[in-house]
Image (spheres, rainbow, N blue to C red):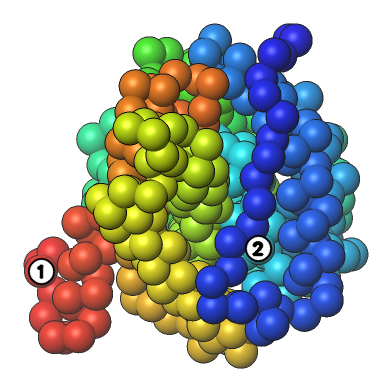
Amino acid sequence: MKSNHKEDRYQHHDYYQIDELLSEDHLLARQVVRDWVKQEVSPIIEEYTDQAKCPVHLFKGLAEIGAFGPSLPIEYGGQGMDEIAYGVIMQELERGDSGIRSMASVQGSLVMYPIYKYASEDQKKKYLPKLGSGELIGCFGLTEPDHGSDPGSMKTRVKDNGDHYILNGSKLWITNSPIADLAVVWAKDDQSIIRGMVVEKDSKGFSAPEIHGKWSLRASITGELVFEDVKVPKSQVFPTIEGLKGPLSCLSKARYGIAWGAIGAALDCYDTALRYSLERIQFGKPIGQFQLTQKKLAEMITEITKAQLLAWRLGTLANQGKASPAQISMAKRNNVYTALTIARESRQILGGMGITNEYPIMRHMMNLETVLTYEGTHDVHLLITGMDVTGLNAFA
């Protein structure tokens, strides 16, 4: 695809000098990803979004810049970096587009991470290097047509059949599934215990139809996973992990990345609105000189700064192994909602131009509507915090 998109003029905004809290490695990783986004993503993303096509060719580039499992060990396909590096990489990717960040989040946090954490050594050696290099594409099968926020009620089943299992069921809203070479799938065994496994795409009875008609994350490919008497060798099943702990640990890793990533979308919207407000003349002066425009911009940078501090502190805790799932939920919920609010306010500053693809704001706004819902909905994360502070389970 050829693009006539304007030059990516993004400038980073750091009102509280949080960059001083980052290491040189963090800043270098961020700059590498930022340069790649400006060169490879920004010139094409509006066209791919408009045509609802996934830029699959970017998987190789994402691997080259270390976006797949950056905090996993190098010998297992990662980059050996820390959790803050993982965060700043996700932030820069989502500054480009939430769908591009989703491609990386799924590959690293929902496919590579569970294989690294729960698979046998043979499985790790078989899959992780090729996933890290982008040679293989993976997806994560947990959500079902009738079970989204309640994964414990899943209907997908694996039945013991001697030296293998027989897998039946379906999953829905699966990022990357139509183009994936393998899926990390969660299903209930004969004792109704949830087990994780790697299922390869060429397995007989395995299909992954694409979901069409999305108005959000249009540059990210989404589909189903359908299993009809699929044979899964027992060597493909994670040997030790049982129950919801497995998939929920993966979701925590992905939600952590989203808490950082959403800031990138917010920054892109704010940067666009700020620059527009200084260039757009109405009533003989820049609209940035009007009080209500300044109110919007001041509130945006305030909320971005709070989100940046929240993410940095969460990253520090994650590096120490102390970031709880509830703390991650709080950051995911807050930062995504903040980004969505900033996108809406930025759109107003641009007026009618804000709805065109000459600017990125409407695309971010549409994408963030999905980010608000996936990896745990806005309301469910609220109740996770509520349960954490009261000790009372609103889900019971």
Q: Amino acid at mark 2?
A: Val
Q: Nearer the viewer, residue 147 or 27?
A: 27
- Residue 384: quarter of image: bottom left
Residue beneath the point at 46% across and 70% down: 305
Q: Residues within 10 Å of mark 2 (few under 14, many from 20)?
A: many
Q: What residue is disc 2 on?
A: 88
Asked if 23 appears above or below 175 in the picture, the reply is below
Residue at left 41%, top 47%?
288
Q: Which residue is mark 1?
A: 394
> Looking at the rendering, in which quadrant would you find the N terminus?
top right
- Where residue 81 appears, as percent x and y from the top left, is 78, 71
Locate residue 79, reporting x and y percent: 83, 63
Residue 78, by quadrant, is bottom right
Q: Residue at x 65, y 45 (%)?
A: 10
| Discs 2/1, front | 2
Decide if residue 388 is in sight here: yes
Residue at image location 24% in from the left, 82% down from the top: 388
Helix, strand, or loop for circle 1? loop
Check disc 2 and report its element: helix, strand or loop.
helix
* Label 1 Cα neighbours within 10 Å, binned few <14 / some 14-19 / many ≥20: few
Q: Position of residue 51 (x, y in %)?
A: 54, 10
For the C terminus, the image quarter is bottom left
Q: Up-down: is 248 above or below 166?
A: below
The residue most toward the front is 284
Q: Earlier in the sequence, mark 2 or mark 1?
A: 2
How far across and how far down the image is residue 86, in percent? 67, 64
Residue type of the residue flagged with mark 1: Ala
Residue 133's label in the rendered image is: none
Q: Is residue 114 left or right of residue 244?
A: right
